[in-house]
Amino acid sequence: MIVHFSKKEILQKESSYRRDLINSLAGYKSLNLIGTKNEHGVTNVSPFSQIFHIGATPPLVGILFRPHTVERHTFENILNTGFFTLNHVTPAFYKEAHQTAARYEGSEFEGTGLEEEYLGDFHAPFVKLSPLKVACRLAERITLQINGTELIIAEIQDIYVDDKGLRKDGSLDLNALETVTNTGLDEYHIGQRLARLSYPKPGKHLEELL
Amino acid sequence: MIVHFSKKEILQKESSYRRDLINSLAGYKSLNLIGTKNEHGVTNVSPFSQIFHIGATPPLVGILFRPHTVERHTFENILNTGFFTLNHVTPAFYKEAHQTAARYEGSEFEGTGLEEEYLGDFHAPFVKLSPLKVACRLAERITLQINGTELIIAEIQDIYVDDKGLRKDGSLDLNALETVTNTGLDEYHIGQRLARLSYPKPGKHLEELL
């Protein structure tokens, strides 16, 4: 049976119902732990799932943050230092990744037991267990006028990837990396491949590439 | 073994390698078919995966489009009419969904055999087979100065969801809906739940909610 919600009905729902529903709408999300370090050397790690591709040349990534109305360490550390890391999450530590969202006084690395790691001379900490780590430098901040949501655009500086997930053509096998994806506010999943499909052209039969 | 790419090495790679790598970085993506109809009544349907939550009150969704340098029917139809639909994809029609990206002369609904559907008096077509359909109205367009990427923000007008995927708290069970997620440019997956986790607090043990 199909359930219909009009805009009016959505707005009349309890706020927690509306938040859960609207947060689930777009589909599976790009979960990453973001690692930062403030000017006093205190590290921070926190889960984010609104991360997306902005461009390949130069390599750019975008991240959405909720409106900047309360203290948000990750966002403030990125603005103040210019540096952060993206780290894929696996089933081995997705619970610790979820737990980093708790309001710890000090570093969430200490609070949750996740180990931090420094690579090259990059300022911000990586998550040691992560099979895919990306070093990013702040390029642009845009505040969306419509509701104060913050969009950060960053340049990709370095990529560290476990070779079990790197294919010859440059694409990543996220099933092999065991990358975790999330939906809504609190639900975690792994992916199970259906297929890679050939480039689509009118009248041409699609081939399964894997 | 960990493979390292510096920014310089990324930029020196062949463009197809770089595109595949950078497109895979963020993780699993929010795949939807977007349905539109132009001023002459010609419908269009095309796959997009950069779709994200902007806010719940009012309910807002954001979509990224590549720079507007060549003819892009979906983007132009949204700008010209103000309306579009989001439609989750399932394993039953993910190949047709992929195929809608081919350069058809007329409507991709006709070209691929996907059936269109009209609900209420909404202008734009839905994808009949989709278990989750969202009617959206253009609210804001932002052109990212850094590389011309276009960000569309839209108000959610109506939601149609198969009740097998709607939980009592308002969250959606995307495993039950069989929502497909994609990675990189051409790879499709279903999700397999690990768990829903309780709200994280320092010192409190996480509970699995499902």
Image (cartoon, coloured by chain):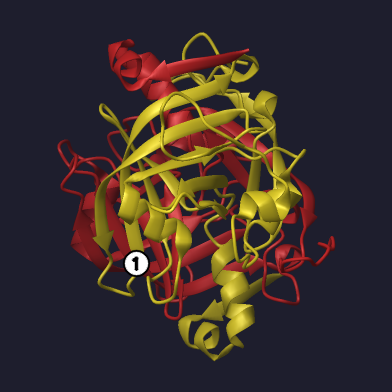
Chain colours: A red, B yellow
Percent position (x, y) of residue B207?
55, 16
Residue at the (41%, 37%) spot, across then down: B123
Q: Position of residue A184 (x, y in %)?
A: 48, 30
Which of these two is toward me, B54 or B8?
Answer: B54
Residue at horizontal 80 percent and vertical 67 percent from the top: A204
Q: Nearer the viewer, residue A76 or A30?
A: A30
Tag count: 1
Residue A196 shown left or right of residue A30 in the figure: right
User: Which of the 4 quarters of the picture holds residue B90?
Assistant: top right
Q: Which residue has dot 1 on it?
A: A154
Point out residue B203 in the picture as x, y percentages from the top left corner.
42, 22
Q: Chain of mark 1?
A: A
Mark 1 is surrounded, within 10 Å at the Cα level, by few (under 14), some (14 to 19) or many (20 or more) other residues, namely: many
- Left or right: A199, with B32 as reference point: right
Q: Secondary structure under badge 1?
A: strand
The reply to whether residue B188 is in sight is no
Q: Nearer the viewer, residue A51 or B3?
A: A51
Residue occupying the far bottom of the picture: B12
Quarter of the picture holding the N terminus of chain B: bottom right
Quadrant where the C terminus of chain B sits is: top right
Q: Is residue B172 above or below residue B114?
A: above
Spot occupied by residue A123 in the image (x, y as percentages of width and height):
34, 68
